[in-house]
Amino acid sequence: MSPVTRKVIMPTVFPGVERGSPCREVSERADPSRDGIATLRFIDKLRYIKQAWAKNRSAVAEMARHIDQLERDKRALEAELAALTIKEAASSHDCNHDALTGLPNRTLIKDRFQQAKALADRRGVEVVLLFLDIDQFKQVNDRFGHVVGDRVLQMAAARLQAIVRATDTACRFGGDEFVILLTNVDDGARASYVAQEIHRRLANPYNVGARSIVLQASIGAAVYPQDGITWETLVAHADKAMHRAKASARSP
């Protein structure tokens, strides 16, 4: 029974109820105006909660849309960064490697020499430069054309790359000239072995299409620190030694 009902019904049903009795007190405490205000307040609170929920739901949906957009932007940025990284790596590779053979170029081998030199100073070992030139290569270009000549250079580069260790460097120095950097050399036997292997492998026929081309190489060597302490000095020393070897091979 509601408070309003109690106030209306109880005095009628129990007209003789005296003031102060439990029933009378219940009847007197019942106040329809106060109950109505509480009900209105409750309804207002429900309306506020409903409006707040609707507003929050809209805000949550908007936030979810922002999060989705941020995720898409993040994926796009990551893809762009990956593409830039690949492009930068390719650009760096192109700057430090020969376009035809893929071997390190002059810039990269010089940098590696500086590293090898520092290591040799710490360990008390040597660094060896082998400067080689493919004999009579110009005749290959003149007779068969530059396409065949380029293919021969690529094959020669692959053979040189197969000879050296991972810590060594085979470089196309220019034209038909190559430089081999041997690091951490503790005796002359290794340098001699590599030079012999170069002679042997480069002398094998180069089969380009239906053609079989046979060439030889002339090699000169320079040793750090005995023959010089700078890159330029060692290259010049090895180049001179190579030309002496070439002239000696032509002598009867």
Image: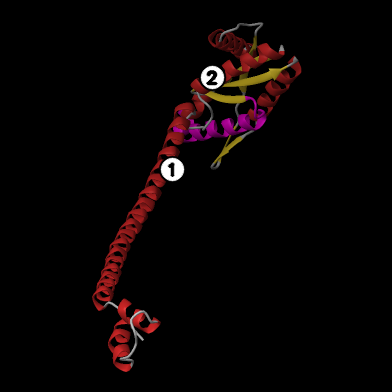
Density class for disc 2 (Cα within 10 Å; few <14, some 14-19, many ≥20) is few
Tell me which corner region of the image, top left, top right, bottom left or bottom right, holds residue 37: bottom left
Residue drawn at point x = 26 percent, y = 78 percent: 32
Residue 65 picture location, percent across and down:
32, 58
> Quick check: 103 above or below 77?
above
Q: Is residue 151 magenta?
A: yes
> Quick check: 116 above or below 33?
above
| Majority secondary structure of magenta residues | helix
Residue drawn at point x = 33 percent, y = 56 percent: 63
Q: Which residue corresponds to mark 2?
A: 111
Q: Is residue 227 magenta?
A: no
Mark 1: which secondary structure? helix
Residue drawn at point x = 35 percent, y = 49 percent: 73
User: Can I make out residue 182 in this image?
Assistant: yes
Name the colouring of the figure. Answer: secondary structure
Q: Quadrant of the C terminus?
A: top right
Disc 2/disc 1 C-alpha distance (Å): 27 Å
Q: Quadrant of the N terminus?
A: bottom left
Front-most of residues 65 and 90 = 65
Residue drawn at point x = 36 percent, y = 79 percent: 20
Front-most of residues 72 and 139 = 72
Q: Which residue corresponds to mark 1?
A: 82
Q: Which residues are magenta?
A: 142-168
Kind of residue indicated by mark 2: Asp
Density class for disc 1 (Cα within 10 Å; few <14, some 14-19, many ≥20) is few
Kind of residue indicated by mark 1: Ala
